[in-house]
Image (cartoon, rainbow, N blue to C red):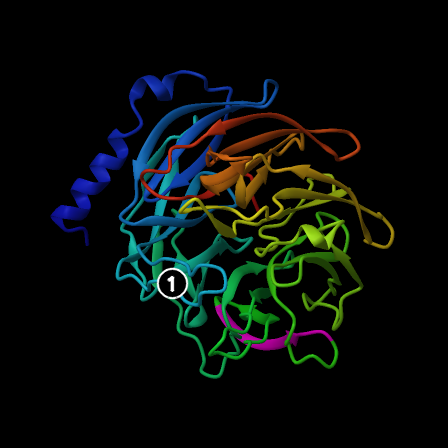
């Protein structure tokens, strides 16, 4: 049931997309970008490589992640006022307002609330929808676990599906996804680097059986002999037509490749391990973030992030950490990736990015502004959306950067309705 405050909030969200915006530019591709609790619709002109803001809705707390229904007519949003921890500084603030919301997507991408939002117990870090459009999968990092929520025939969010005890959710879950068969679910658990007064937490890739919304332990993947120590996976993506899984390793500055078995399990060990930096001397903290395989399956993209700071004249300025998009070509027989480019990020902390369904554009969201030293002067590099044209060879040609105002919060997520 909706209370008066919920109903008023839904009306405000609906009104945020004016009718004039709905009626014009219908040929543009809907693109979404979040800053704090604000989720902004842009019209993406793929031919020109440009974005036009068209309206903003406000979530009840900061947007954490979004995922479309397979039919592309509903967008699900996880939000929370919890905060992630700073690199090397442990846990962030847990917060006390955590939600899962659904929005109906209009023909032009405008969002209107669909059903009642669901309250979650702790901060969600990632969400996805199974391939049948029947369940929402939500991952949480502290404590590390997953909840599964049944979806109604109209896409509304239903009750949480009870799970058996004893499920192995690892340490610091970062991403949850159904495999292409929809028979299994992967959970990427990053672990944590050691701190002065805290030992390292091991990472792993967990694979669960998946039946009618219920999970069952199937695999826990770590490098041989490591027990997950020195292993820090963050996100993965599936090749669109070959049996390979590509994994970004935040704590290792690496891209690993696993085989995908017909039953939805993964190969017990990585088939290939590739560095995402050509020169490790450029590393100043941070690490790879999201990962996406190109729609044609010939390339895979992984951003490198570095937002460490040093003191200069009483201010915190960039320590020169490397920010780029690593581009890999994929061998179509073996699945082996080969690094062919490191495209400049034109910003700091590319946390999320997206590729248009035609595979012609890549848009990456730099999370936060950063002070940069230039000789004796200090300048500011804004947060923003870096737009690249993707060549036939998979390489990125930078077109432009659209600055993003982060006064409402960090530039935390961006994406399209075609993201999977």
Secondary structure mostly taken by the magenta-highlighted segment of the chain: strand
The percent coordinates of residue 198 (x first, y second) are: 48, 78
The percent coordinates of residue 28 (x first, y second) are: 50, 22
Residue in the foreground of this view, choosing between 114 and 173: 173
Question: Does 18 sit left or right of 181 as displayed?
Answer: left
The percent coordinates of residue 329 (x first, y second) are: 79, 44
Q: Which residues are magenta?
A: 214-223
Displayed quadrant of residue 398: top right
Q: Label 1, secondary structure: give it.
A: loop
Does 218 appear in magenta? yes
Query: Residue drawn 25% across and 29% down?
Result: 15
Residue in the foreground of this view, choosing between 243 and 150: 243
Query: Residue drawn 32% across and 17% down?
Result: 20
Can you identify the residue that label 1 sits on? 92
Query: Residue drawn 51% across and 74% down?
Result: 169
Question: Does 119 sit left or right of 403 as displayed?
Answer: left
In the displayed orientation, state which residue is furthest to the right: 333
| Residue 242 visible in the snapshot | yes
């Amino acid at each position: 049931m909706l209370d008066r405050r919920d109903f008023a909030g839904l009306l405000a969200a609906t009104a945020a997309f004016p009718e004039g915006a709905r009626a014009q530019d219908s040929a543009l591709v809907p693109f979404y970008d979040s800053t704090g609790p604000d989720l902004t619709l842009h019209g993406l002109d793929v031919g020109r490589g440009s974005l036009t803001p068209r309206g903003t809705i406000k979530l009840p707390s900061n947007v954490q992640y979004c995922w479309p229904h397979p039919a592309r007519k509903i967008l699900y949003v996880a939000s929370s006022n919890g905060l992630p921890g700073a690199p090397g500084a442990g846990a962030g603030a847990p917060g006390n307002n955590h939600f899962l919301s659904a929005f109906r997507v209009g023909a032009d991408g405008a969002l209107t609330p669909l059903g009642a939002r669901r309250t979650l117990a702790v901060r969600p870090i990632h969400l996805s929808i199974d391939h049948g459009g029947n369940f929402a999968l939500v991952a949480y990092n502290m404590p590390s676990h997953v909840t599964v929520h049944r979806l109604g025939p109209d896409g509304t969010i239903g009750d949480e599906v009870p799970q058996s005890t004893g499920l192995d959710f690892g340490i610091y879950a970062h991403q949850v996804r159904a495999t292409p068969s929809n028979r299994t679910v992967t959970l990427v658990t990053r672990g944590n680097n050691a701190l002065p007064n805290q030992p390292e937490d091991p990472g792993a890739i967990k694979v669960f059986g998946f039946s009618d919304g219920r999970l069952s332990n199937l695999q826990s993947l770590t490098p041989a002999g490591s027990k997950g120590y020195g292993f820090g996976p963050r996100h993965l993506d599936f090749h669109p037509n070959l049996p390979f899984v590509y994994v970004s390793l935040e704590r290792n500055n690496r891209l690993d490749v696993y085989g995908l078995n017909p039953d939805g399990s993964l190969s017990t060990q990585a088939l290939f391990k590739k560095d995402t930096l050509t020169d490790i001397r450029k590393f100043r903290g941070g690490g790879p973030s999201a990962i996406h395989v190109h729609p044609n399956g010939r390339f895979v993209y992984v951003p490198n992030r570095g937002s460490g700071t040093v003191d200069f004249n009483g201010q915190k300025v960039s320590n020169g950490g490397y920010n780029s998009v690593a581009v890999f070509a994929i061998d179509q027989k073996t699945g082996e990736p080969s690094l062919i480019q490191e495209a400049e990020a034109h910003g700091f902390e590319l946390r999320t990015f997206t590729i248009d369904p035609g595979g012609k554009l890549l848009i990456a969201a730099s999370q936060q502004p950063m002070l940069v030293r230039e000789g004796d002067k200090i300048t500011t590099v804004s947060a923003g959306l870096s737009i690249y044209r993707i060549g036939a060879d998979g390489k990125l040609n930078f077109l432009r950067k659209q600055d993003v105002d982060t006064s409402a919060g960090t530039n935390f997520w961006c994406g399209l309705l075609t993201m999977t």
